[in-house]
Structure formats: structure tokens, C-alpha cells
Image (cartoon, rainbow, N blue to C red):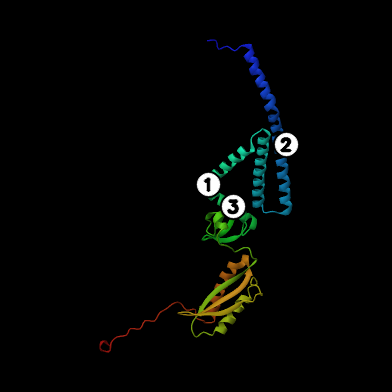
Amino acid sequence: MDYSLDLKTLDLIKQQLIDLAFQVGPKIVLGLIIFFIGKYLIGMANKIMRRAFDRSEVDPSLATFLLSFSRVVLWVLLLISIATTMGVQMTSFIAILGAAGLAVGLALQGSLSNFAGGVLILLFKPFKVGDTVEAQGTTGEVESIDILYTKIKNFDNKLVTLPNGILANNLIVNYSQKSTRRVDMKVGIAYGTDIKKVRKIILGILAKDERIHHEPVAVVLFNNFGESSLDLIIRCWTDTANLWPVYWENMEAIKEALEKNQISIPFPQREVHHLYPEEKK
């Protein structure tokens, strides 16, 4: 059997290739033009957005996320435009994207929840890098806020990584957001002690500390009849950064002042009485 191609067949194939080139060629050229123009415009758009964020002093974490997200959206739109130019049916293309998105969404449910939580944290700013927060049983300084996770450094220098989805949907205590904090101290004195005298001594100590604010005024209040002591609560206000130094130093100063004035600071104790029948005495 002769498998050789005759000239007529070769001419037919050649003509079909030429026709195909005339049909597809312009679309390919147009697609390449759209690609390079779109790439240039995406770069320009990102530069404009970056400058706008710099002028408006947007949080760096939020700016980085928004730039990355907008770049992805613009590239998707560019690819859709190129596919449309090449003659791809949009209904089929959208169906493929939808199916792929559904599969990815089911596989990455936890990550998508963290992603959404990161967006909420960056937008509403319940805390920022450098703040001291308490969340999910962890207290420490926020070291970084990523789009999926937040890293908190404990006071003993352990790094805790928490998913943003959990943070965005649970209680967060921010100790740094307010410029002033109330210092609460508790002191127990022996029963029979003159409370007014003790109050005067303690307020005199607090008045010497320049870090303590005059408004609201510091107070010493009788709080409770304890098992072994009369319990007093001391409240004063200071700058957030001075909270713990004010607490530690004044607690020590109060102890020394009470001892100097011979005011007893009791410790828990219990009296035991033995009762015997009359014939066993």
C-alpha cells in the first residue's frame, strides 16, 4: 500500500494551516498585546495604591495585604480578558473557576477562616504590633500580625502562634490601648488596728510617688472582714507603662511603713480548742 502524500493532499494541508494561522494568529497577537499592556497597568495601579497608603499612613500589615489581594484580583481579571479574546466561552471558563473554587474552599476551610479573621483584625485593629494583650489563655506582646496567624511573645520569652480565625471570634483584652491604667493593691491588717491611721500612712506613701496621677485621686478602702485580717484595697492611677513598677515598689514601701509604725500584718492562723468530757480531765 502506498502511504506517500500526493501534491494535492499537501496543498490541502498547507491551505488548512494557513487558514488556521489567519484565524488564530490575530487572536494570539491580540492576547499578547493585552497581556503586556495589562501587566504594565497592574504595576502602575500597585504603585499608585502604595503611594496612597503611604500618604494616608495605613497600617503596614493592612497595606501589604491589600496590595497583594488587589494584585491577585487584577491578574485574574486580566486572564479572563485574554481568555475571552482567544475565543474561550465565558460560561465554561466561569464553570471551571467555580468548581475549582469550591474544591479549594472545602479543602482549606480552616485557612479561609483564618484569612477572614486576619482581614477583620487588620481592618478593625483590636490590637497592633507592640500591644500587650490577653487572648486564649495567653498574655504577652504582639510580635507580628500575618494574614493567617498572629504571633504573641510571652513575658518568659515563649512565642505563641494563634490562628486569626479564633482571635477574631473570641475575647481579646488589650492592656496597651489606653494610655492610663488603674493600679489595684491589697493589704491585710490585724483586727483592732485603726483603719484611719493606716489609710493616712498609705496615702502619704502614694503621694510621694510622682508617677501616680492626682486625678482620679488615690483611695484606700476597707474591703472585707477576712479570716485573719481586715482587708484593705488600694487604688490609684498611673501611665500604662508604669503600671507594674508602681505596683511592686509601692507594695514594698507600704510593708516597710506599716512595720515602722508597729502595725501588724497578720498571716492566716487558726485556733484549735480541745474539749474533753468531765471524767477525762
Q: Quadrant of residue 13?
A: top right
Q: Write the residue at 69% across / 35% down.
A: 35
C-alpha distance separating marks 3 and 1? 15 Å
Where's residue 108, x and y in %?
53, 47
Camera-nearest label, 3 or 1: 1
Q: Which residue is mark 1?
A: 106
In this orientation, which residue lies closer to the viewer: 168 or 9?
9
Answer above or below: position of 114 versus 172: above
Choose the circle earlier in sequence order: 2 or 3.
2
Identity of the amino acid at label 1?
Leu
Name the element at disc 2: helix
Query: Could you say where residue 150 lies in the image, as x and y percent from the top left?
Result: 57, 54
The residue lying at 73 percent from left, 50 percent from top is 52
The Cα–Cα distance between marks 2 and 1, rounded to whole angstroms, is 35 Å
Residue that mark 3 sits on? 116
Q: Earlier in the sequence, mark 3 or mark 1?
A: 1
Q: Is residue 242 above or below residue 77?
A: below
Q: Toward the viewer: 124 or 57?
A: 124
User: Measured from the top left, where is residue 133 in percent x and y?
Assistant: 58, 61
The residue labelled by disc 2 is 37
Q: Quadrant of the C terminus?
A: bottom left
From the top left corner, tell me how far across and down residue 173 is, in percent.
57, 63
